[in-house]
Image: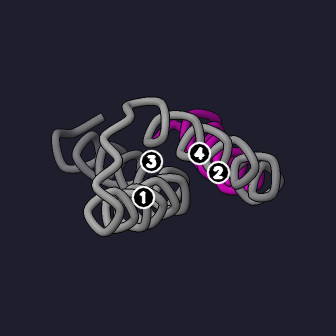
Amino acid sequence: MSGAETLDIAQQAIWALLIVSLPLMLVGLAVGVVIALFQALTQIQEQTLVFVPKVVAMFLTMLLILPFMGATLSGFMDKVVDMIIVGF
């Protein structure tokens, strides 16, 4: 296995990681901005007000996109296994 093939697999792994984690990160960002705006408008500075809704929103998002996450990671693993079987 050459260095170029190793870098190609690493690049594909990083892209798979980004594709799988992006929806969760975007939901966390959106909920965080909405809560921060609400806190700034009402001057409520409660820490649990930020933490609990963000965790709940990310958990619900993960439940909804779990099939997509599994399919993406399974597709990447199939590519890696095929490369191992073929012998690179």
**Picture coordinates of residue 28, whole percent (x, y):** 46, 53
Mark 4 residue type? Pro
Badges 4 and 2: C-beta atoms under 8 Å apart? yes
Residue visible at 64% across and 46% down in the picture: 73
Frontmost of labels 4 and 3 is 4
Mark 1 or mark 4: whose residue is earlier in sequence: 1
Residue visible at 37% across and 31% down in the picture: 47
Residue visible at 48% across and 60% down in the picture: 31
- Where disc 2 sits, the SS reads helix
Badges 1 and 4: C-beta atoms under 8 Å apart? yes
Snapshot quadrant of residue 34: bottom left
Q: Residues within 10 Å of mark 3 (few under 14, many from 20)?
A: some
Frontmost of labels 3 and 2 is 2
Task: Assign the C terminus to one quadrant of the image.
Answer: top left
- Vertical placement of residue 73 versus 18, above or below: above
Snapshot quadrant of residue 37: bottom left
As measured in the structure, the alpha-carbon distance from the residue carrying label 2 to the one carrying label 1 is: 12 Å
In this picture, which residue range is highlighted in magenta?
Answer: 70-88
Badges 1 and 3: C-beta atoms under 8 Å apart? no
Helix, strand or loop: magenta stretch = helix
76 drawn magenta:
yes
- Numbered badge on residue 17: 3
**Picture coordinates of residue 2, whole percent (x, y):** 22, 39
Residue designated by label 4? 53
58 drawn magenta:
no
Of residues 80 and 73, the one drawn nearer to the viewer in this rendering:
73
As measured in the structure, the alpha-carbon distance from the residue carrying label 4 to the one carrying label 3 is: 24 Å
